[in-house]
Image (tube, rainbow, N blue to C red):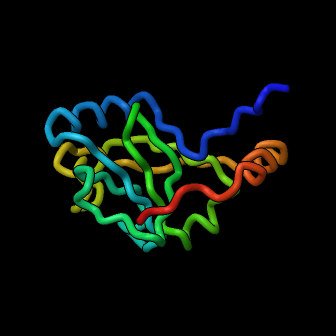
Amino acid sequence: MATPILPSRILSTSAADALIASLTDKHGPLMFHQSGGCCDGSAPMCFTRGEFKVGAQDVLMGNIAGDVPVWIGAAQFEYWQHTQVTIDVVPGRGAGMSLESPEGMRFMIRSRVFTDEEAELLESAGEPMRGA
């Protein structure tokens, strides 16, 4: 019997992947963190990998653009665990701490609710990895 393929919790658009590649060329390996804050804190924040300290209250949603990890605060994950999140990019001014800000672009999220079947598969797979 074949092992079922789990749906991805995190995806990225080709436009986001292109900006991530450009930022990687400038800054080296990257990471994202999605908090549950208000205003800019609710946008996905892009950092040079290791610049943001991931802790036990952070959940790894997966990787985008090859090997770029996307973390989310555990409290926010509780709200979003039933949704597939896609990181996209649009013109505009993003958060001051996020690496895309000087580029005149900002990362944003789009989401959809998992189907019942997808949610069951993810639940059967157990809890996602947490930070150290």
Q: Nearer the viewer, residue 23 or 49?
A: 49
* The furthest residue to the left: 26
Q: Residue at x 22, y 45 (%)?
A: 104
Q: Residue at x 44, y 63 (%)?
A: 131
* Residue 40 appears left or right of 22: right
Q: Residue at x 76, y 31 (%)?
A: 3
Query: For the C terminus, which image quadrant?
Result: bottom left
> Residue 13, position in %: x, y?
46, 33
* Residue 103 appears left or right of 54: left
Q: Nearer the viewer, residue 56 or 91?
A: 56
In this view, 15 is above or below 72: above
* Residue 105 appears left or right of 85: left
> Residue 103, position in %: x, y?
19, 43
In this view, 87 is above or below 16: below
Circle count: 0
Query: For the N terminus, which image quadrant?
Result: top right
* The furthest residue to the front: 1
> Residue 49, position in %: x, y?
26, 50
Q: Residue at x 71, y 32 (%)?
A: 5
> Residue 22, position in %: x, y?
22, 32
